[in-house]
Image (spheres, rainbow, N blue to C red):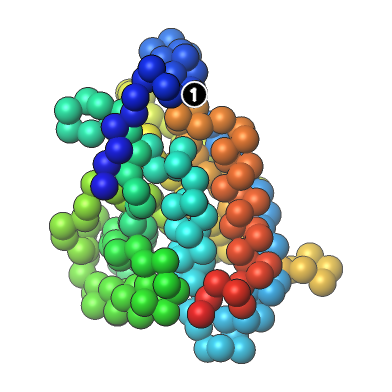
């Protein structure tokens, strides 16, 4: 499941060393994703938008090696065969959130069923972690449904060994004949560049546009 990087043959070995040791750069990229077709499709097929979007995001993440990079318990750099989504649920009564996770499955119907079940089973469980036993191969995904933000940034005062991207999307809005979803991805420059962030966003956009081919 975890594939250790062979630095002698790693195309980004110099880039990794430079950004992990010297510049230590993190970056954000934001984009309004067109979900016009996706929103219409989910409504017609009585699908919930949130788990459908999580599936689409994870399908894109799992198609790009650089989005699955990690440092294992031995301190070795590598990448997982796939990642599972670790995503948030909101508790309206006390305005707190909790993290849950669902095993990724490339088949949408399987993932969707499991995600809906997790959302239902965990909706009243409080605390940061509402579902235990989260695996090491995860991607953080969150939703801010109250605002159509134009950008979203993160900062920490210390280095973190986590290399997975952090993904957030907001409240969709209407622009002429299109429905747009604010989307941002926060990533570590040591393992990915602007090309990989663009590839992720373009892949998500493509799946949303051709959703009837994937959400089956």
Residue 40 percent coordinates (x, y): 66, 81
Residue occupying the point 35% across, 52% down: 83
Residue occupying the point 68% across, 54% down: 32
Residue 26 percent coordinates (x, y): 48, 28
Residue occupying the point 24% across, 77% down: 121
Position of 176 with respect to 94 (left or right) is right
Q: Residue furthest right?
A: 176
Query: Disc 1 marks which residue?
Result: 11
Quadrant of res 146 = bottom right
Between 10 and 176, which is closer to the camera in this rendering? Answer: 10
Q: Residue furthest front?
A: 9
Q: Is residue 3 above or below residue 142?
A: above
How many numbered circles does the render carry?
1
Position of 12 with respect to 7 (left or right) is right
Position of 166 with respect to 169 (left or right) is left
Mark yes or no: residue 18 visible. yes
Identify the secondary structure beneath mark 1.
loop
Quadrant of res 92 = bottom left
Q: Is residue 36 above or below residue 29?
A: below
Residue 181 percent coordinates (x, y): 63, 61
Mark yes or no: residue 162 visible. no
Between 117 and 11, which is closer to the camera in this rendering? Answer: 11
The crowd level at tag 1 (other Cα within 10 Å; few <14, some 14-19, many 20+) is few
Q: Is residue 3 above or below residue 133?
A: above
Residue 186 percent coordinates (x, y): 49, 39
Residue occupying the point 21% across, 69% down: 125
């Amino acid at each position: 499941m975890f594939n250790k990087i062979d630095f002698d043959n790693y195309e980004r070995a110099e880039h990794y060393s430079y950004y992990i040791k010297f510049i230590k750069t993190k970056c954000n990229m934001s984009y309004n994703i067109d979900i016009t077709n996706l929103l219409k499709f989910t409504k017609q097929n009585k699908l919930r938008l949130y788990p459908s979007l999580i599936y689409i995001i994870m399908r894109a993440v799992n198609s790009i090696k650089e989005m699955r990079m990690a440092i294992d318990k031995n301190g070795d750099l590598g990448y997982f065969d796939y990642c599972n989504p670790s995503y948030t649920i909101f508790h309206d009564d006390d305005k707190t959130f909790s993290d849950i996770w669902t095993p990724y499955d490339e088949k949408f119907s399987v993932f969707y069923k499991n995600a809906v079940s997790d959302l239902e089973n965990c909706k009243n469980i409080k605390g940061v972690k509402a579902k235990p036993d989260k695996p090491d191969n995860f991607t953080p995904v969150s939703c801010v449904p109250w605002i159509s933000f134009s950008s979203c940034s993160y900062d920490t005062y210390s280095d973190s060994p986590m290399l997975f991207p952090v993904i957030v999307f907001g409240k969709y809005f209407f622009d002429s004949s299109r429905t747009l979803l604010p989307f941002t991805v926060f990533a570590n420059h040591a393992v990915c560049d602007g090309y990989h962030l663009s590839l992720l966003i373009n892949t998500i956009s493509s799946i949303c546009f051709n959703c009837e081919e994937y959400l089956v």
